[in-house]
Amino acid sequence: MNKLAIIYCACMLAAPMAAQTQCKDAKLAGKTVTVKNVRVENTNNNMVVNLDLNMDSLDLPSNMRLVFTPMVTNNTEQRLMPQIVVNGRKQEISYKRKGYKDFADNAVVVRRKNNTAQTLHYSAVLPYEKWMKNADVVVAEDLCGCGDIKDQNTVALKRMRTPFMPYMRPEAEARKVRHEQGRAFIDFPVDKITLYPDYRNNPRELDKIVSTINLVKNDKNTSITNVEIHGYASPESPYEHNAYLAENRAKTLKDYVRKLVNLDDKTFSVTSTPEDWEGLREYVAKSNLDNRDAILKLIDNTTLDPDAKEWKIKSTYPADYRVMLDSWYPALRHSDYVVSYSVRPFSVEEAKEIMKTKPQQLSLEEMFMVAQTYEPGSREFNEVMATAVRMYPDNPTANINAACTRMELGDLEGAKIYLDKAGNSPEALHAKGVLAMLEGKNEEARQLLQKAKDAGAQGVDKNLQILGM
């Protein structure tokens, strides 16, 4: 069941997402009757209206009757809901005798008991129609009690406005380049650059690299453009020696892997970092070493060369150094690998299938085209937009579109999270203006929408018009 505040735009099964602005504590009958807790919901293609009619301040003469007629209207269309009949004591008697014939069978009738606290809860159901997305819930008050609503005073209870959602078509990606990456811990004998495939955990670690490369290589939709292997050594030996080990172990690893995957040597590149101080710092920062802060200060000291830094830690804090040497240094000797590849373009039908298995191979534009094959607000449409922002979490367009889906679902807090990452482009301002509309912040919405329009955003006039209704 979908509340009117979380209704879908252009969805076959539900009504559009609507902003609701309530006229707080609307007053009727010369301000003696107060309308409270007005709620409008959309349930199973019906509009459900609930409200409380507080009559505590109403002193109704015995021979008087008040008739209130709630309705939904947009000035051209109008749908009436069951009338509310409030009788004085004598009018209640008259009503029961024959007066009820003047009203519909579904009228809600109550006798006012003066000088007592009295609240009537009212609920009505209407079939939902599309025009209601930009309509008002009002009540016509008949203080003569005849039940005729012509030329009566009407009081607005709630304004419903459905913004146009400013979905953006992403720019085409000229060439789709993707990367698969990982980290392998290849064991080499101490101070050696010779690779033994069966040594310690090497079979498992080598398989990680080879499997990643083959996964891309054997995919008919991709072409490998580069395989980078980056070697790291730990700091416990002289820096120059570590530089030699890191570089040449990476070269040895490259040569071995290249033969296994049968790729041209030009496809590979080798880089290295002599000592992984950055990795060591992360371990220390997360630790409970007795001298953690002092060691971090030494690691961050840029006036010390790497060998002096390592010796200072070792000689000043030998117990902590032993923990570092035994627990963390082995993990600092690692080989990071990045498999870069290009992906061919996909048709919409192909992209639908790729979405199910390898969405990372799709461009944002391809995902957007897939979304266009579904009804806006449908489960499939929303899933595509959610996948797009998951694959491209920092892309402003993906975040704007994801925010629009959240707003259509009524999840305004979720929309804010995405809009915080959407930037301040004209399109982002437009979306933020829509959010303000849905929050009932009409003045803020008007300013944002006007700013977006002045900056060149498309479709803003639709929302300015809706806001001004």
Image (tube, rainbow, N blue to C red):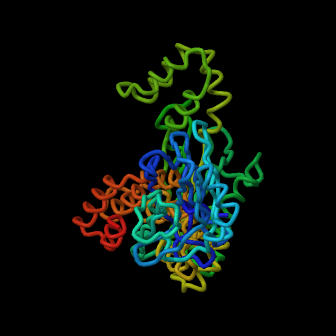
Q: What x and y, as percent, mark residue 469?
A: 35, 67
> Could you tell me if residue 86 is visible in this image?
yes
- Tally the marks: 0
Q: Quadrant of the N terminus?
A: bottom right
Q: Position of residue 40 (x, y in %)?
A: 56, 60
Give the answer, above or below, for where 251 lies relative to 118: below
Reply above or below: 373 against 178. Answer: below
The quarter of the displayed image where residue 76 is located = bottom left
Q: Is residue 261 left or right of residue 242?
A: right
Q: Nearer the viewer, residue 79 or 446?
A: 79
Q: Judge whether residue 266 can be spotted in this image.
A: no
Q: Is residue 174 above or below residue 245?
A: below
Relative to 374, say whether 57 is above or below: above
Q: Position of residue 107 (x, y in %)?
A: 64, 64
Q: Residue reaching furthest left?
A: 454
Q: Tell me the quarter of the picture where residue 170 sits.
A: bottom left
Residue positioned 47% across, 55% down in the render: 418
Instruction: Give the percent coordinates (x, y) of residue 168.
Output: 41, 71
Q: Is residue 14 left or right of residue 269?
A: right
Q: Residue at x 42, y 67 (%)?
A: 163
Is 154 left, or right, of 9 in this rendering? left
Residue sitting nearer the eye, 453 or 340: 453
Question: 330 or 240, which lies in front?
Answer: 330
